């Protein structure tokens, strides 16, 4: 349904996202994992056509039969909210503080041609659908009268208002407490038509998604079915990230990845992870391809010389971009 | 991203202000002619022949007057803004730092401020002029006092923002007390806001001095002042518009220069913007 | 005394020091804190918010004590009261037997010398206009103690090069900034290090480095650690004891392993159930 091929995002001379390719099927829930600076949010913004000034996207992204990248703003406005919509991290700043919540939900529908009265009715209905108690009363409230979790539900109602084909969530629960987060994740899983869920939290992805993409340094370094990737990570970054996410009881040392995530544009050439990787060799100065059946260009052989122990495609949809994979 | 990108506003503003300052400095040692020399023969002399911008109805050289007038302008700006900053900043910082338990202090400072703010600067100058005699000094004090509330308000608002930051909490936890926090954390962090306020106030002071001189409550003759040059050119506005044009242009460019300089400095002084990711 | 002997992976070197008779260092008794919202009416005072409703706890010398709670639970208020950065409405806080609640700043030098804090967001807790050298030295300067070569020593202790001293905080990554904040907190050789969510603003790949560093420093310097977090798993990794704060009250307290294995209060159970984990998958 959504097909992204060779999506790159650049700002002036910096390539912030490089050649990202993936697909999302109808009803599928895909997690996009990455730390700060990985390019995960830019990828989402590129799909929404919401990149900041001076930042441009290239490549193709098609949702159904519609192009999302390289389309004039006028056309995008129509797509945005109707075929793709997005829930952001910070629910307070994403809502207009001077407008009643119901009116804000209704507004996104009238923008796309729904009659005013009908939109108001639907707004209350949607607020109920995101399981807000007493939707009529919530519709008359202002954002500051709601809790963080309630506001995020309102954002979700707004995102769902025009029955989009794809919902993108960018860290929607990061600002929420864990008890509220749990309910929100369950709700998202229930209502999302097809989902691209962006987060830095591996455990959140594990509780929600069927497939994952792991991004680092603006590239997808590993992708595949969630269980497969989390149980048998192949890329050394994924391996390190999973190890670092585990919190053993007291008295044991935590696994860490050395160094820090570089600032945008400061990632090394070749494999973007090689400056933090214990397994890096000279081979890693050449960028490894993301190989496996996920490669949308078809099951091509790795481009490197045959002697190199490059990544081998596997039959289970598990792909990774690493010269010295685990296992 | 090598080197520091120079900000266009800063360069333009700096250049304009630089010209004003240079003109004022040069005028101490040299002007084309004596700016106060009345020369009946050279009355309304056209530009040219040693009188680059011509002469006024008393035959005084316009360029020389402009140069010496720049001195007056800067003098007024520096003193007025100085008064406003020296009085207004501590008041604003004190009001902004006052803990909730001493909210009355903050309230008192700000209500007195409002009172001064509500009083028109020109009226204050006219009153002071009536009591102590009109002159540059009276004008400067009046403009300065009238600008205090603007400084106090900006300083208070900026201080309140700084006071809720974690680094102020961290400084308290480190054992810093009020005065040290004010000097080490608040002032450096509201500095850029104050500089912008100073440059805007400077521009306003220049305008106010010009207006006062135009009304006859500012700089007394024969000391040249841009405002008074405007006033004297008033009756000849249609026959000899250049007499109004030059001082008007000088005021406009000086005001623009200070405004641009203020904006440019704000960006330039911010260490985050200065060497972002660096 | 909670014995970690039952958990075979516990490393004896990192096990809590001291015997069963450790002396209390920080004691809070019946702390309450009521905030008033700004008044919205001329006739009525602003609405009262009861952030803490009577909290008592004891942190022993050498202990690693965790405080767990969600936003709005009152844990931040509690932390501020324990550090004498705010005054309680009622109740008392003593440090090594001396009352600290309600004292003016000038009488708190003994506390500032002995107790230092690491804040959640190292970007906002470090003054952006100060160089690292001045940031790290600030507690010493504030206490009127000589700085000498201490800055380089401290930077080394947290794994930063001495050259870091001449740079500004924004030139560092999040994890490095938190190291700077830790170096600063350690400057006056405090007995107690209070850490307020020190890793929740950090990337996962860096979190472990900071938690390991805190554990190492606590061991080497014999620090008492008060660790505030929303994440019980992080507290379980680092602390021996825990207090779970909910709605202005401590709903459960005890050895962290006991609370983790068999939470007694419904809220603790709900909290544990809500934390997403990887354990089931792996």
Image (tube, coloured by chain):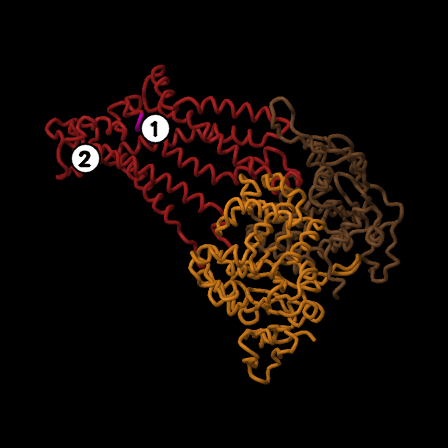
Residue A54 in picture, x, y percent from top left: 44, 57
Q: Quadrant of residue C104?
A: top right
**Regarding mark 1 in the picture, which secondary structure is present there?**
helix
The tint of chain C in the picture is: brown
The answer to whether residue A69 is left or right of residue A149 is: left
User: Which is nearer the eye, B13 or C190?
Assistant: B13
Query: What is the chain identity of the residue bearing mark 2?
Result: B
Q: Which chain is orange?
A: A
Up/down of C95 relative to A307, above or below: above
| Image location (x, y in percent) of residue A76 | 46, 58
Q: For the view shown, which residue lies furthest in the left direction?
A: B41
Image-based side of A261 in relation to A66, left or right: right
Of A9 and A216, the residue lying toward us: A9
Q: CA distance from mark 2 to mark 1?
A: 22 Å
Q: Position of residue C46 (x, y in %)?
A: 65, 28
- The red-coloured chain is labelled B
Residue C150 seen anywhere in this rendered image of the structure = no
- Rendered position, C178 above or below B125: below
Q: Which residues are magenta?
A: B207-211
User: Which residue corresponds to mark 2?
Assistant: B242
At mark 2, the secondary structure is helix
- Most extreme residue toward the bottom is A307
Disc 1 target residue: B208
Q: Main secondary structure of the magenta part?
A: helix
Q: Position of residue C252 (x, y in %)?
A: 82, 44
């Amino acid at each position: 349904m959504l097909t992204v091929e060779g999506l790159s995002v650049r700002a002036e001379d910096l390539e912030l996202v490089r050649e990202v390719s993936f697909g999302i099927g109808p009803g599928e829930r895909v997690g996009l994992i990455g730390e700060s600076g990985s390019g995960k949010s830019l990828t989402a913004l590129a799909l929404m056509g919401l990149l900041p000034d001076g930042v441009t996207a290239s490549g193709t992204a098609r949702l159904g039969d519609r192009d999302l990248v390289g389309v004039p703003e006028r056309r995008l406005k129509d797509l945005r909210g109707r075929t793709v919509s997005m829930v952001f991290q910070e629910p307070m700043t994403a809502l207009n503080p001077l407008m009643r919540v119901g009116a804000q939900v209704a507004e996104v529908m009238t923008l796309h041609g729904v009659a005013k009265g009908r939109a108001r009715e639907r707004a209350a209905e949607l607020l109920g659908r995101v399981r807000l108690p007493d939707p009529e009363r919530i519709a008359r409230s202002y954002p500051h009268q709601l809790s963080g979790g309630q506001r995020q539900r309102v954002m979700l109602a707004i995102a769902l208002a025009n029955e989009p084909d794809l919902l993108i969530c960018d860290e929607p629960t990061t600002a929420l407490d864990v008890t509220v987060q749990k309910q929100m994740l369950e709700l998202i899983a229930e209502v999302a038509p097809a989902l691209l869920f962006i987060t830095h939290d591996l455990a959140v992805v594990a509780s929600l998604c069927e497939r994952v993409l792991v991004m680092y340094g603006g590239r997808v370094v590993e992708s595949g079915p969630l269980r497969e990737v989390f149980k048998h990570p192949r890329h050394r970054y994924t391996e390190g990230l999973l190890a670092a996410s585990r919190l053993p009881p007291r008295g044991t040392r935590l696994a860490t990845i050395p160094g820090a995530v570089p600032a945008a544009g400061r990632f090394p050439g070749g494999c973007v992870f090689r400056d933090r990787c214990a397994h890096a060799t000279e081979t890693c100065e050449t960028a490894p391809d993301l190989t496996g059946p996920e490669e949308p260009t078809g099951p091509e052989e790795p481009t490197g010389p045959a002697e190199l122990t490059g990544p081998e495609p596997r039959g289970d949809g598990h792909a990774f971009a690493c010269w010295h994979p685990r296992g | 991203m090598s080197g520091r990108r120079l900000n266009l506003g800063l360069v333009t503003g700096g250049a304009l202000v630089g010209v004003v300052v240079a003109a004022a400095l040069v005028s101490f040692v040299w002007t084309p002619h004596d700016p106060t020399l009345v020369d009946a023969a050279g009355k309304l002399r056209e530009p040219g022949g040693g009188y680059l911008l011509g002469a006024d109805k008393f035959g005084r050289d316009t360029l020389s007057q402009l140069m010496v007038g720049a001195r007056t302008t800067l003098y007024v700006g520096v003193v007025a803004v100085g008064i406003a900053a020296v009085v207004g900043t501590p008041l604003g910082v004190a009001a902004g730092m006052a803990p909730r338990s001493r909210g009355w202090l903050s309230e008192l400072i700000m209500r007195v401020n409002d009172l001064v703010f509500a009083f028109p600067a020109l009226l204050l100058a006219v009153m002071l002029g009536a009591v102590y005699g009109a002159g540059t000094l009276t004008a400067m004090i009046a403009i300065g006092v009238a600008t205090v509330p603007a400084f106090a308000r900006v300083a208070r608002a900026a201080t309140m923002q700084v006071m809720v930051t974690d680094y102020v909490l961290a400084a308290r936890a480190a054992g810093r007390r009020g005065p040290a926090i004010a000097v080490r954390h608040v002032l450096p962090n509201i500095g850029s806001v104050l500089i912008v306020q100073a440059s805007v106030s400077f521009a306003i002071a220049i305008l106010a001095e010009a207006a006062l001189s135009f009304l006859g409550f500012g700089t007394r003759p024969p000391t040249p002042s841009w405002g008074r040059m405007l006033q004297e050119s008033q009756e000849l506005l249609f026959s000899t518009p250049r007499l109004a044009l030059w001082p008007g242009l000088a005021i406009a460019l000086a005001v623009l220069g200070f405004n641009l300089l203020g904006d440019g400095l704000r960006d330039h002084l911010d260490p985050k913007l200065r060497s972002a990711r660096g | 005394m909670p014995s970690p002997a039952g958990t075979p992976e516990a490393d004896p070197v990192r096990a809590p020091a001291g015997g069963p008779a450790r002396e209390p260092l920080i004691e809070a008794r019946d702390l309450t804190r009521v905030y008033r919202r700004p008044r919205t009416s001329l006739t009525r005072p602003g609405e009262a918010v009861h952030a803490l409703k009577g909290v008592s706890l004891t942190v022993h010398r050498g202990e690693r004590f965790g405080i767990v709670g969600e936003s709005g639970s009152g844990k931040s208020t509690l932390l501020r009261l324990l550090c004498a950065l705010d005054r309680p409405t009622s109740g008392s806080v003593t440090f090594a037997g001396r009352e600290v609640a309600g004292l003016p700043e000038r009488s708190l030098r003994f506390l500032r010398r002995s107790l230092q804090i690491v804040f959640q967001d190292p970007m906002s807790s470090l003054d952006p206009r100060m160089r690292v050298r001045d940031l790290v030295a600030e507690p010493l300067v504030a206490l009127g103690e000589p700085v000498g070569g201490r800055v380089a020593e401290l930077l080394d202790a947290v794994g930063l090069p001495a050259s870091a001293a001449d740079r500004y905080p924004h030139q560092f990554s999040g994890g490095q900034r938190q190291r700077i904040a830790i170096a600063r907190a350690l400057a006056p050789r405090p007995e107690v290090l209070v850490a307020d969510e020190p890793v929740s603003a950090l990337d996962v790949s860096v979190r472990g480095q900071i938690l390991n560093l805190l554990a190492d420093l606590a061991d080497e310097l014999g620090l008492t650690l008060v660790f505030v977090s929303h994440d019980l798993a992080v507290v379980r990794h680092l602390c021996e004891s825990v207090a779970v704060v909910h709605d202005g009250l401590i709903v459960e307290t005890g050895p962290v392993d006991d609370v983790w294995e068999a939470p007694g209060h419904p809220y603790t159970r709900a909290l544990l159930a809500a934390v997403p984990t990887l354990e089931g998958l792996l």
